[in-house]
Amino acid sequence: MYRLRKIVLASAIVLAGIPVWSQTPAYRAPRTADGKPNLNGIWQANNSADWNLQGHSAAQGPVYALGAVFSIPPGLSVVEGDEIPYLPAAAAKQKENRANWVKLDPEVKCYLPGVPRATYLPYPFQIIQSRENIMMAYEYAGAVRTINMGAPTKAPADSWMGWSNGHWEGETLVVDVTSQNEDTWFDRAGNFHSEALHVVERYTPRSADILNYEATIEDPKVFSRPWKISMPLYRRVEKDARLLEYKCVEFAEEVLYGSLRKKASK
Amino acid sequence: MTTRLPLSIAAFTAMIAGSALAQAPATSTWTVPRTPDGTPDLQGVYANATLTPLERPKGLGAKEFYTDQEFAALMKRIQSGIVPEEADLGNAAPQDVRYDLSLYGFDVTKATLASNKRTSLIVGPEGKVPPMLPEARKRNAERAAKNKGHEFDSYENRPLQERCILMAQERIPMLPGAADNNLLQIVEGQGYVVLLHEMDHSTRVIPTDGRPHISQKIREYQGDSVGHWEGNTLVVDTTNFTDLSAFRGSGEKLHLVERFSRPDEKTLLYQFTVEDPDTWDKPWSAEIPMAKAKGPVYEWACHEGNLDEFVTILRGARVEEEAGNKAAK
């Protein structure tokens, strides 16, 4: 009986979506020369969140000719409680987005990914910490953002990667992201937001080579309440790991402009 | 060539007076600060607008620098509205279609400049790009000929800049040429220097731990950059270019060495040397002082805004063909 209760309790914790690491003891990261937790490095998610933030089964990919290559891998949810609290009209739009994924997803077009999607795209990104700001450089599309670590400043304009103000809470880098435009998505399942999106990210070192990543997502035009995603990010520990050039524009051109090719003369 | 130029003399005077290098060279005791990691602190935002032409005007022969008197006289001529051959005014120079440059901040004469007394950006007695080797001329001519008459056939026939793949202001080495979107932001972290070009958010994350280049099998439009510190100077070595990212007709053997230093608080001195045995018979070098500028660097998203413009270019060509076909029937 006792054993059964333990199992039930464990399942209840998993079902409640409480991340596993909440039970691990606090880890103190090495410090930078100016005394901050040292998050410098190349990091990458290792999940299929970019396919769908919510739990999803394996599925046939959109290009039949590719067979089992580029089919859609299954994945556990990264959303707390596995529920994205869409307002009714927004829920309908998400369904439409999903049905027309290949046509509408900004990633298909090689557009800048926005935050948090940039974090869990299937490409590495690099954190470079200086005293005044922290840069996050993403391999995908050469996307980049500069996180201001001084007194918070206001965005001069909306942009694809938004405006990031950061600060430290103990071991955790907290980044407040506002002023993203409405044109980015969260994943290939059509999950979306409006220009009222407000994201608060938390990067907490869990061990030398793992960061816990959490993002709280708030958008009163699309969601009925704030919701949260979380996942580990792993250090790319290969000797000589580095970001390579992934200028994807040229891979999107046929999709965008192919219909305007000159027809072969008869 | 001498042209009258409608520019604001007051603005120009202010600019010259404000330029760091126009004044007597450093007798100051300024030394470059250090980051917490102990590396020379080159961080900041810099602009590379300049009035100095890339190649030396023919009449000046092997003369690399103006004397103080000559420099003052040259500035006086420019201030009086004469644009001599010695000054390269970029967008501010007279042109057929004139934008209101002052409105959009494109006017180089109103930009913060780090001017210098060099007669050309290219250093050395010759002051010009060495002649292109015959095989390189042939290679470039063949490529141009192949595209001739097919310029509007497909996206692949359009220039990289128009396709938002490689913009002029993000190309390396960084040559001045535009007075807008020409900011460079430098950020230093442990073992890395980041060079962020305003134009199209092009970012180079450069390791400074002495590691070698990546495999030659990997080719990149921006090449592979590795760096190291020599005293107070950051030295960046770049290879692994593609044969499409041609710099003034170069091929994929292009080898670029860039040097970044801060001679004074307001200036980033950018020097580069390029060599390519398939293109020039010898290396050549240039030197461009960049002026400290006010940030932040805004996001430049070229491709994301290119759809309508680019579609219009190709559709226009298709519509013309259609009309031509109808007329022929």
Image (cartoon, coloured by chain):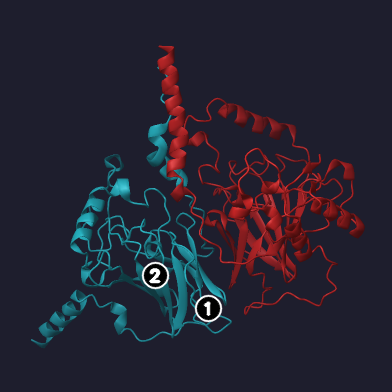
Chain colours: A cyan, B red
Secondary structure type for disc 2 = strand
Dot 1 amino acid type: Gly
Choose top left, top right, bottom left or bottom right for residue B141.
top right
Q: Is residue B233 left or right of residue A61?
A: right
Q: Position of residue A102 (x, y in %)?
A: 30, 47
On the rendered structure, is A125 left or right of A213? Answer: right
Q: Are marks 1 and 2 in contact (CB under 8 Å)?
A: no
The three-letter code of the residue at mark 2 reads Leu
Of all chains, the one bearing label 2 is A
Q: How many C-alpha atoms fall within 10 Å of the one at disc 2: few (<14), some, or many (≥20)?
A: many
**Neighbourhood count class around disc 1 (C-alpha, 10 Å): few under 14, some 14–19, many 20 upward:** few
Identity of the residue drawn at 41% across and 38% down: A257
Name the residue that disc number 1 marks. Answer: A150
Position of A247 relative to B316 (above/below):
below
Residue B181 in the image: x percent, y percent?
A: 59, 55
Q: Position of residue A188 (x, y in %)?
A: 30, 55
Q: N-terminal of the two: label 1 or label 2?
A: 1
Taking the image as shown, residue B223 lies to the left or right of residue A83, namely right
Secondary element at tag 1 = loop
Between B1 and A263, which is closer to the camera in this rendering?
A: B1
Q: Residue at x 29, y 84 (%)?
A: A23
Q: Which residue is mark 2?
A: A233
